[in-house]
């Protein structure tokens, strides 16, 4: 179950959920990592909360309650970041608040947390969060090298960077090529048949 | 059971029964041949660096085609000339000298991303060569807009940078442009032969016209797209061309300068007419060309960059399936839905 979120059902590369932040904030590894960790935090806390509350949630009212729970934990991480990481928050703050709308958080609450006990839900949130962070760091690592000529913020190239990679179009190219690469590894080395992604 | 003698079998097949001698590879190589005059003029004016840039594009396009088809377990079809044509068109749309990695990146975007990943020849939505150029233009705008003074001869590698006629027209006006070349007739002659700054293959109007008319004569392209594209551009240039800069007014623009300069002729004859990315219906082709013309003039007169043919064609590529669908005639005998 733990490996599921990182490879088999990686939120970005396999489920094709939450592509908006995967493209929008991944221009530097620092931004990508912070975004990933924020989503990781929200995923784990939301899954725990929903799992604990599930006896009290009426099935017909569950969507609004999920929304409120997610919004609560997003507010928490939003306030923490604006207090302790002002520099990065200025760049990606808008997308932190938008975690409320990320389909990956909502779908884990609906699919896992509302049906499982607390510990498995927390592990699922952790797994999905690590998978998401891994995807964002990988995308932003490639984009930072190609677009800014830098690794972890340290510039290595004098020449003009490949600007397109910093634009949203370049982000989509990288996400698409990485999806293809992962499918190729699956088919070639792990002997699996490819699954088609969902997406929203 | 009687076995028919060889050559006397009854062949049952679906239509079409009569097949033409034309094939994809024959058409592609003919288009390559039609681009030869413009390529020669480009090398003549801009020197060996131009030939080097174009060859680099062709080699990397063909190589990427082969590598991608090999990785995707497809049949390798580099002999059909389509990757060669993409490379040639991409190279002719670039400034004469670029760092070596830019043509390679452009070829990668053109062949791998735009063409092969969308399904290969016949399935791409956008013109591959233009996507390659657009990526380079957006990524390395300065290198992609550093134009060289045409030297007419193999003088050396030290080229003098200059502005394109459209750049001068946009920033300093028609009066300044005529002043640069002497008289208005001198300007027309320079534009017609190609002795102006610009991309390798776009400057020489006469060479492109020779290639374009050759293709029309062979029936490989129809007149609809080039005529409506160039015609719309000319009419709009005449009506609105005098407006920017505050001089003149309506109906004072110079359509001939707008037709002969920039990538209009190359785009209208060789890139807007791409079979894959333009409408099939003749009326649709007229609409497609007119749309390209309107967008070109909007960008030239009111947009940021001085030239707009590339973005105009790419934007109209998006619309060509829609144009085709909305003009599709009813199949004979079918019932209206």
Image (tube, coloured by chain):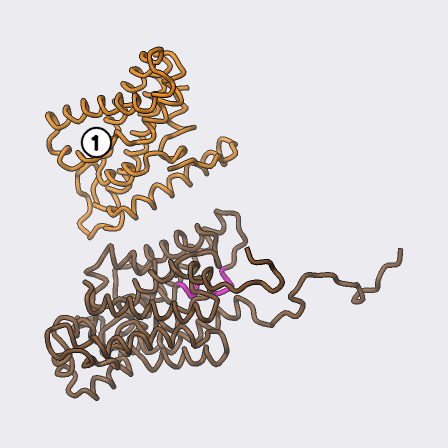
> Is residue B80 one of those drawn in magenta?
yes
Question: Badge 1 is on which residue?
Answer: A96
The image shows residue B9, relative to residue A117, as above or below, that is: below
Q: Main secondary structure of the magenta part?
A: helix
x and y percentages locating residue B253 in the rendered image: 20, 79
> Is residue A9 one of those drawn in magenta?
no
In this view of the protein, which residue sits in the foreground, B297 or B175?
B297
Picture quarter with the C terminus of chain B: bottom right
Q: Which residues are magenta?
A: B78-86
Instruction: Answer with the quarter of the image where residue A121 lies.
Output: top left
Instruction: Answer with the quarter of the image where residue A179 lies.
Output: top left
Picture quarter with the N terminus of chain B: bottom right
In this view of the protein, which residue sits in the foreground, B321 or B160?
B321
Name the residue: 25% across, 86% down.
Answer: B189
Name the residue: 29% across, 37% down.
Answer: A22
> The residue marked by circle 1 belongs to what chain?
A
Label 1: few (<14), some (14–19) or many (≥20) C-alpha neighbours in 10 Å = many
Q: Secondary structure at mark 1?
A: helix
Task: Say if residue B101 shows up in the picture.
Answer: no
x and y percentages locating residue B280 in the rendered image: 48, 66
The image shows residue B69, relative to residue A10, as above or below, that is: below
For chain B, give the colour: brown
x and y percentages locating residue A34 in the rendered image: 21, 30
In this view of the protein, which residue sits in the foreground, B140 or B134?
B134
Residue A194 as seen in the image, left or right of residue B235: right
Count up the numbered dots: 1
Name the residue: 20% across, 68% down.
Answer: B306
Q: Which chain is orange?
A: A
Residue extending farthest to the front is B336
The image shows residue B236, relative to residue B103, as above or below, that is: below
Task: Say if residue B133 shows up in the picture.
Answer: yes
Residue extending farthest to the right is B1
């Amino acid at each position: 179950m733990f490996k599921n979120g990182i490879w088999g059902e990686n939120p970005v590369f396999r489920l094709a959920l939450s592509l908006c932040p995967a493209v929008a904030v991944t221009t530097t590894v620092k931004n990508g990592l912070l975004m990933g960790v924020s989503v990781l935090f929200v995923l784990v806390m939301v899954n725990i909360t929903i799992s604990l509350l599930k006896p009290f949630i009426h099935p017909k009212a569950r969507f609004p309650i999920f929304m409120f729970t997610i919004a609560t934990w997003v507010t928490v991480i939003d306030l923490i970041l604006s207090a302790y990481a002002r520099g990065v928050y200025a760049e990606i703050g808008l997308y932190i608040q938008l975690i409320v709308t990320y389909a990956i958080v909502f779908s884990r609450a609906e699919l896992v947390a509302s049906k499982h006990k607390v510990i498995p839900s927390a592990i699922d949130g952790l797994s999905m969060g690590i998978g998401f962070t891994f995807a964002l760091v990988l995308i932003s690592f490639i984009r930072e090298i190609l677009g800014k000529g830098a690794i972890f913020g340290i510039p290595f190239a004098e020449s003009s960077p490949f600007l397109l990679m910093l634009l949203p179009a370049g982000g989509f190219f990288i996400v698409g090529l990485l999806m293809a690469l992962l499918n190729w590894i699956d088919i070639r080395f792990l002997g699996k048949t490819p699954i088609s992604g969902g997406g929203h | 059971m009687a076995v028919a003698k060889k050559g006397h079998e009854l062949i049952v097949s679906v239509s079409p029964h009569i097949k033409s001698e034309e094939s994809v590879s024959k058409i592609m190589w003919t288009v390559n041949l039609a681009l030869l005059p413009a390529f020669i003029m480009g090398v003549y004016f801009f020197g060996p660096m131009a030939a080097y840039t174009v060859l680099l594009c062709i080699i990397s396009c063909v190589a990427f085609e082969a590598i991608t088809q090999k990785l995707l377990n497809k049949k390798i079809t580099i002999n059909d000339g389509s990757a060669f044509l993409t490379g040639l068109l991409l190279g002719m749309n670039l400034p004469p000298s670029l760092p070596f990695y830019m043509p390679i990146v452009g070829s990668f975007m053109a062949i791998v991303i735009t063409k092969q990943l969308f399904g290969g020849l016949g399935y791409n939505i956008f013109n591959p060569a233009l996507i390659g150029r657009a990526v380079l233009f957006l990524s390395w705008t300065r290198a992609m807009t550093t134009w060289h003074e045409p030297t007419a001869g193999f003088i050396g590698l030290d080229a003098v940078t200059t502005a394109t006629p459209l750049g001068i027209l946009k920033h300093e006006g028609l009066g300044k442009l005529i002043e640069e070349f002497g008289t208005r007739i001198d300007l027309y002659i320079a534009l017609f032969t190609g002795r102006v700054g610009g991309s390798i293959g776009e400057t020489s109007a006469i060479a492109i016209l020779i290639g374009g008319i050759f293709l029309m004569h062979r029936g490989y392209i129809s007149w609809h797209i080039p005529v409506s594209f160039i015609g719309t551009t000319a009419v709009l240039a005449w009506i609105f061309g005098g407006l920017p800069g505050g001089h003149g007014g309506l109906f004072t623009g110079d359509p001939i300068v707008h037709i002969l300069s920039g990538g209009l002729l190359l785009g209208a004859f060789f890139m807007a007419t791409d079979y894959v990315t333009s409408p099939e219906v003749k009326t649709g082709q007229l609409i497609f060309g007119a749309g390209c013309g309107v967008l070109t003039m909007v960008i030239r007169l009111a947009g940021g960059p001085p030239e707009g043919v590339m973005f105009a064609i790419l934007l109209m590529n998006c619309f060509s399936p829609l144009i085709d669908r909305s003009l599709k005639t009813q199949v004979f005998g079918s019932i209206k839905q």
